[in-house]
Image (cartoon, coloured by chain):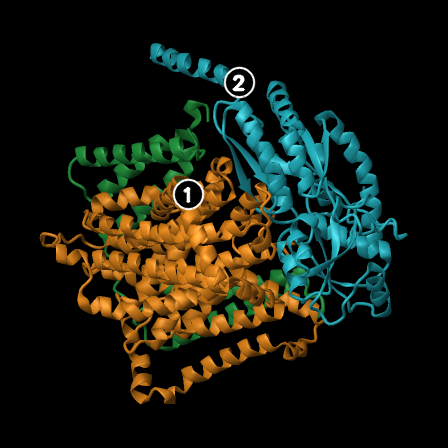
Amino acid sequence: MKRWAMAVLGVCLPAMAHAASSYPVKPINCIVAVEAGADGDVLVRPILQRVSKMLGQPIVVVNKPGGGSSIGYREIHAARPDGYTIGWGSATIITNKLQGVSPLDYHDFTHLGGYATFFPIVIAATKSKPQFNTIQEVIAYAKANPGKLNMSTAGVGQSWWVAAMAFIGGTGINANSIPQPGAGAMTVAQVAGGHAEVGVAALGSAKSMVDSGQVKFLATLGDGRAPAPYDKYPTMKELGYDVSWESTNFIMGPQNMPKEVVAILAGAIEKATKDPEYVKFAIERNTRWEYIPPGDIVPSFDKRRAVVRDIMSKAGILKEAK
Amino acid sequence: MEGLHLLLNGFASSFTAVNLLACFIGALIGTLVGVLPGLGPTATMALILPFTLPYGPTTGLIMMTGVWYGAMYGGSTTSILVNIPGEAASVVTCFDGYQMCRKGRAGPALALVASGSFIAGTIGLLGLQFFAPLLGNAALSFGPPEFLCFMIFAFVLLSNLSSEAPLKGALMITLGLFLSTVGINPMDSYPRFTFGSEKLMLGIDFLPIAMGLFGIAEILSIAVEKYVKPVVHQVRLRDLYPNGDEVRRSVKPMLRGSVLGFFVGLLPGPCTVISTFAAYSLEKRLSRHPEQFGHGAVEGVVAPESANNSAVMGSMVPLLTLGIPFAAPSAIMLAGLRMHNVEPGPMLFTTNPDVFWTFIAAMYVGNLMLLVLNLPLVGLFARVALIRPQILLPVISVLCLVGVYSVRNAMFDVWVMVIAGILGFFLRRWKYPVSPFIIGLVLGPTTENSLRQTLLMFQGDVAGIGDRPLAVALLALAVAFLVFRHWPWARGKGYALKMEEGKSL
Amino acid sequence: MERRLTLETLFEAVLTVLGAAIAAVSWSYGFGTLARPGPGLYPFCIGVATALFGAVALASRLREPARREPPLDPVARRRLALLSGIFVFWIVAMPVLGYVVVTLIAVYASAKTLELEGHVKPLAVAGGTALFIYVLFDHWLYIDLPRGMLAGG
């Protein structure tokens, strides 16, 4: 009996030690808390692909949208911290907790690196009854007709929904926000079809509609103007409104991941992000490329959180006591 | 004509070894995935996406469409043979397909389904090729009120699937609608009926329930019957392929299913599933023998299966012409295209027209490849149905268990399937129709979201719908169907009597 | 005198109560206004409808003469219970024993429940199934099937 037990141990122990020292030995799952094809999803896949090549194991993307990404985040948080489950994150990691949608925020995860920042834009319909050519017209109309402006937004809790709320709060208008499930595709569709007069979505989602003239690009909610050829559209800040919203995308894992695994992953992610081909891709997708090392993420998000709290409380969607 | 010229160009470039191989591999994988209970096209497409990246956007698109398309082909196989829907869009095929199998007509069913899928794919491609931009714009004109009216219309249309016991059917619909609300609602991120359980927050997935209600319930039903060894007769070649009567009866349903499926595919949400229900319901209404439905009516098998194949093509329309993915598999394709910096949408025809045309050409070829691949396999698959239940059932049961787990890596889904299975067993005994439940579950989320969005748009003043011609037209259609049902003076008294006697599911 | 309380009647009663429960819980979610509908409105209506239909079904059943299906015979009942039990076992034992062992046991047990003769055939079928699942799901598709505590999880 004892010999049998020893034999079993003799097989298991080296196997377990082996697993730890030569990470990764099996495929890695990356939980992306937004639907496939959305901007966040499209930006993270090339990084994962490069990392996967570097590590020699496939990285499988599992999309788990819903609840303003809180469902996906919960899953990442609950996963085993063995390095075989990692996840994508965006600004919602800050807003989820502030909105009362989830008790988790960026402090509850191990960070592996940030790579790009998105900013949303305001688009206007060309088929709706009241049509707008500039953002000032929109604001004027909304102020004159409170509650009548139909604004299509992303799903409640989603990054772009918070942005839309920030827009409404920052400009002081009373608009009728109509959430569409998802992170942007349906929002753009509704505006293009004329069912809503304006909408807030990411530039990547709206690009084809803007280029073909089906919707009008009115303004951007970023700190700086959008890259060419969209740099002729103003930012809200330029127009005098204290409205800006950005979402930094990053990769993270559950708490307490082993240090060696974190080092391997973070190193690979850094190399992947700094690949000039990827930089080109990120800019082509209308994002601001910036690499944030894992150690810097929490402090920079802390700063961002203060700003975000302010925006959300002005917009009336802050539900957190802290 | 320019279109033809471009299409010929498309054929030329699609005839590269890479593209044709991609189509074949995709279709093969898709068919296998469709046959396997549980694993669906979306997950598979997500898995192979990274592998397609080195080959360019068109090849990737071709391969992934091949997978989706192949899954529609393969999903019906297990539906017919063992009453287990290979994936969500094959649920309806279970109704009559399995009955055909029990009557020994499994081979004909499989063959007709393969042919129907081919015809549907071709019709869908023709629609995509000639009408894509036009239809894309039409799809845009669907706003929340139009969706709401369409849902109302869908409920009315599909109500004939429970005509026998309307009260039981109504109960089933409300149950389905209720289950669809469990989870976090996208409109306000508010968790409902989750009672703090993280598992429930994800919502109750449709596939485990379908597999349980049909597959597991059937397994249990067969298990409790005494096994009667059938008279072993040689499987004649004649039995493997449809007879003249079956072929004749299938032609029109195939065509109708294809056209209907294509249009349903234009809409967001689970379009392939809805297309199968719509096609089935339509055939039942148009049939002179509606009482046969549910007992092996061949129309009820080929129409849904054709519909789901052309729905795939229909779903490509908003993807390619608007850049808007209305269904989960389309979203994966969108991700793939965007990774190559090909932005589908109105500009696709200006910036990357070759993507569109090469894709269409390759799909025509792929469609043919699938037919050639599947028809000979009919014989092989039909023999599976002859395996003794003592061997077949245990294997299938475990495959279901593993298959359903593999979709979301969630034991919760397996629990759902087993519980649904046991419940389904009893529902059958008590003659509760199952399809209304599925309809409620599938249509529930869209219905609620459209309702709330419409109310938001009009600030509670529902009369605003009157200003929107498309919505009004859909409502009128719904009313027309209701009238038609209860006063079938258009079809004569005999029809009404038949409807009364007609057994339903 | 036939008993009116069958499993089916119980089911309808459960549904009625469930409908009422749904309505009650939905109430607590808030209805909002017609202009800004809240999360509770829709499920409330569903709950009310379910309770209503359930009550009507229950009432009509209690009124009409009992028309029962012949009950399941003991063999059938035993098989039903056994198979259900095997499925539950598969789910519950999986994290502990790993999918290979559990699959082997489950297939063997189901085959015997269905009265497959002998021991060799059930074992062969069980082995074949387990092997197939391993190759397809584990090896090819990278599905993370639980391996049980013995193999490190």
Q: Which residue is mark 1?
A: B19
Q: Do the numbered discs 2 and 1 sit on residues whose CB atoms are within 8 Å?
A: no
Q: Is residue A147 left or right of residue B103?
A: right
Which of these two is toward me, B398 or B361?
A: B361
Q: CA distance from mark 2 to mark 1?
A: 41 Å
User: What amino acid type should be assigned to the residue bearing mark 2?
Assistant: Ala
Chain identity of mark 2: A
Residue B36, relative to residue A145: is it above or below? Answer: above
Whether residue A261 is situated above or below residue C125 in the rendered picture:
above
Q: Which chain is green?
A: C
* Helix, strand or loop under label 2: helix
Residue B110 percent across, percent down from the top left: 26, 56
Q: Position of residue A314 (x, y in %)?
A: 85, 52
Mark 2 Cα within 10 Å, few/some/many (few <14, many 20+)?
some
Q: Chain of mark 1?
A: B
The residue carrying mark 2 is A20
Q: Colour of chain A?
A: cyan
Residue A86 appears in view: no
Quadrant assignment for the C terminus of chain B: bottom left
* B284 relative to A81 in the view: left or right: left
Q: Is residue A4 above or below residue B425?
A: above
Work out whether residue B225 or residue A167 is closer to the camera in this orientation and state it. A167
Q: Position of residue B346 (x, y in %)?
A: 60, 57
Q: Amino acid at mark 1?
A: Asn
Please tell me which residue is depicted at 80% across the width and 38% down the height of the picture.
Answer: A304
Foreground mark, 2 or 1?
Answer: 1
Numbered disc 1: secondary structure: helix
Question: Is residue A53 toward the left or the right of residue A302 in the image?
Answer: left
The image quadrant that residue A98 belongs to is top right
- As drawn, B15 above or below A23: below
- Color used for chain B? orange
Residue in the picture at 34% in, 30% down: C101
